[in-house]
Amino acid sequence: MKKEKEIIRSIINGNEKAFASLYDFYSEKVYSTALSYTKNVEEAEEITQDVFVKVYQSAAKFKGDSTLNTWIYRITVNTSLNYIKKKNRFTLFKAMKINTTPIDFQHPGVLLENKENAAMLYKVMDCLPDTQKTAFVLSYIEHLPRQEVADIMKTSLKAVESLLQRGKKKMRIELEKSYPHRRNFKN
Amino acid sequence: MDDNKEKWIEEVFQSMQKSQRAQVRPELFQNVKKEIAAQSIKIIPLPLLKKYAAVAAVVLLVNSSVLLYYDISEKVSREDIATLEPYKDQLITTYLIYE
């Protein structure tokens, strides 16, 4: 925590090296999270850029109540959700919205044998409301501990467990509908 | 069949296990720096703006007060002189008692 405060203090004082090293450490986490929300590389990059600009401008506001990791993830989640809301607001027709979202999103970091299932996972995640999606993304895609997810979402551990349970239930229903139509690579 | 379905559903939920994080383009950091530089020109923090406004107001007030005081002082001096003028001759003439 002391080291984190030193980094933040350096950034406030305009130390570019400190900011660069913060970027190096967190950029993949931020980008990966944003990608899970947008399923689009360009949009995820835009969000990543916005997040780090916000981190730089808000460095003085970081009081150390949470860890730097929690704080940055929180900014990332909020920026991603706001981006999607803004994008949906300016879509003239629902049909246009459907066409811009890829049908099968292929996450670049997924193991080859899991690609098909991962694409299905991202597809059914769209049926979740923001809170359930956030809990799922942070737990199952970012692999964060449940308590950290609770800290990021500013809620309790119990609430996160409940969100995950309800989210998985909803996704399960969608997956059951898709089961007969899945492409089975394994026999 | 149900077991296979359950197994498949669990596999879907676990499909992101052991996945690697997506790589960011290295050029993105340059874009971040450019955006910060561009925004630091545009943004004037409101508290700072308020301070500048307060200082300007104080300077104006002080200057106005000084000018007003100077103007009043000038008027008073002229009025004093005008008031004393008739008494100047009278004071001089009353001293000649043995004329």
Image (spheres, helix red, strand yellow):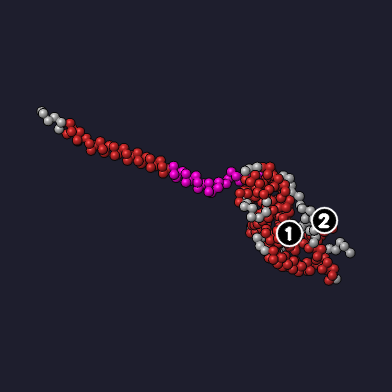
Q: Amino acid at mark 2?
A: Leu
Name the spot of residue B11 as percent of width and height, x first: 81, 63
Visible residue check, residue A79? no
Dot placed on the residue nearer the N-terminal end, 2 or 1: 2
Name the spot of residue A26 as percent of width and height, x first: 71, 50
Residue B44 shown in magenta: yes
**Which label sits on residue A111?**
2
**Which label sits on residue A126?**
none
Q: Secondary structure at mark 1?
A: loop
Residue with the most extreme bottom position: B2
Q: Secondary structure at mark 2?
A: loop
Q: Quadrant of residue A121?
A: bottom right
Mark 2 or 1, closer to the camera: 1
Residue with the most extreme right position: A187
Q: Nearer the viewer, residue B80 or B24?
A: B80
Q: Write down the chain letter for disc 1.
A: A
Q: Amino acid at mark 1?
A: Pro
Q: Which residues are magenta?
A: B33-59
Name the spot of residue B75 as percent of width and height, x first: 30, 39
Visible residue check, residue B4? yes
Residue A125 shown in magenta: no
Crowding around mark 1 (Cα neighbors within 10 Å: few <14, some 14 to 19, many 20+) is few
Q: Please name the residue shown 80% across and 61% down the image.
A: B14
Q: Please name the residue shown 76% across and 50% down the image.
A: B23
Prevailing SS of the magenta stretch: helix
Q: Write down the chain letter for disc 2.
A: A
Determine the CA span between mark 2 and mark 1.
22 Å
Quarter occupied by the C terminus of chain A: bottom right
Name the spot of residue B2 as percent of width and height, x first: 83, 71
Which residue is label 1 attached to? A145
